[in-house]
Amino acid sequence: MKPPIVLTAFGTTTSGQQSYAFLDQQIREAFPEHEVHWAFSSRMVRDFSRQRHGRKGKGPAEVLEELQARGFEWAVVQSLHLLPGHEFYRLVAEVQDCRIRTSMGLPLFWSPADYGAFLEALAPSMKVAGNEEAIIWVGHGTDHASWITYLGLQYLLSKRFGSQVYIGVLEGQPSREDLVAEMVKSGRKRIRLFPLMLVAGRHVQDDLAGPEDSWQTSLGAAGLTVTVEATGLLSYPGVVQIFQEHIAQALDIIPAGNQSRLHRVPAVEPGHINLPDDSTGNLAKGKR
């Protein structure tokens, strides 16, 4: 039995489900010998799914226990998180308490190669029309130590695409106020807002493009012309490829005979975590 793949997201209660459907299709095509399952870490999202659509959303532990009961010895749990913050490490802790052996697929931003592949995925969208236009990628933000990810992205985006590409966050730094002041100071006239989020869910509808107290209204009040590109990152094929590679890396550390290789996308070098039983860049539990 080939190890199943459990795609695990916080979840969304909005039309962002379309991005999940695209990812699901791509993963099934890339790993045709493996079952693909979904889990949602947010209880609110699971309850919403049951109430609105009449189907029970399952948490990671529930999905893994069901797979273990069916006789699977190993499963890949692919984190659908942007960065290794609070939500990711809560997922790691939950998975480690399950009886089935697991190999963890890492978040979008982990190794230097992930950042490089991400820049390539964005390249077609990074064309700026003159010095008066700017692009701002807006993420959620975090108070976890991984907040430095956003500053690293700012440096890499500016280096690759020029000083007219910025990073902002909903919570923390660089803030909305910081970016509005920077746009006015730099003489920008036109702003394109992109969500630095896997799905274009409620944060995009309310915080980026909402009619009140949003990035769009704040920038507009400063005299800037603003458009919002309401497309989540999972709609970019290059971003999906990064997750495919993380799944392939997670499969690679499962003992021979329990896994099969992807009809592989071009390899990128894995990141590394120093754990007693693993030097491949993935979090493995239950290895003998």
Image: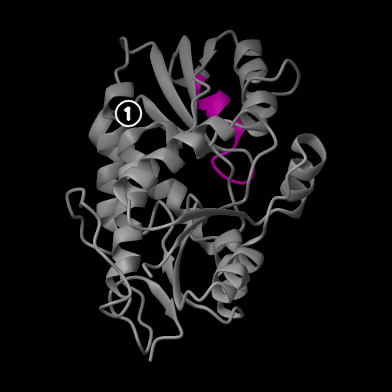
Residue 99: name its quadrant: bottom right
Name the residue: 24% across, 35% down: 160
Residue 186 % position (x, y): 43, 20
Q: Which range is magenta?
A: 171-183
Name the residue: 63% across, 20% down: 209
Residue 239 % position (x, y): 35, 41
Above or below for 167 versus 80 = above
Name the residue: 79% across, 35% down: 52
Residue at the far left in the pictured view: 266
Is residue 236 part of the magenta span, yes or no? no
Q: Is residue 196 visible?
A: no
Residue 44 % position (x, y): 77, 49
- Would you call the spot at circle 1 few (<14 residues within 10 Å), some (14-19), or many (20 or more)? some
The main secondary structure of the magenta stretch is helix
In the displayed structure image, the side of residue 207 where residue 183 appears, left or right: left
Above or below for 171 versus 104 = above
For the image shown, how many numbered marks are present on the structure?
1
The amino acid type of the residue labelled 1 equals Ser
Viewer-proximal residue among 132 and 144: 144
Viewer-proximal residue among 15 and 90: 15
Residue picked out by circle 1? 163
Viewer-proximal residue among 287 and 74: 74
Q: Is residue 230 visible?
A: yes
Residue 51 % position (x, y): 82, 40
Is residue 174 part of the magenta span, yes or no? yes
Determine whether the residue tagged by mark 1 lies in a helix, strand or loop: loop
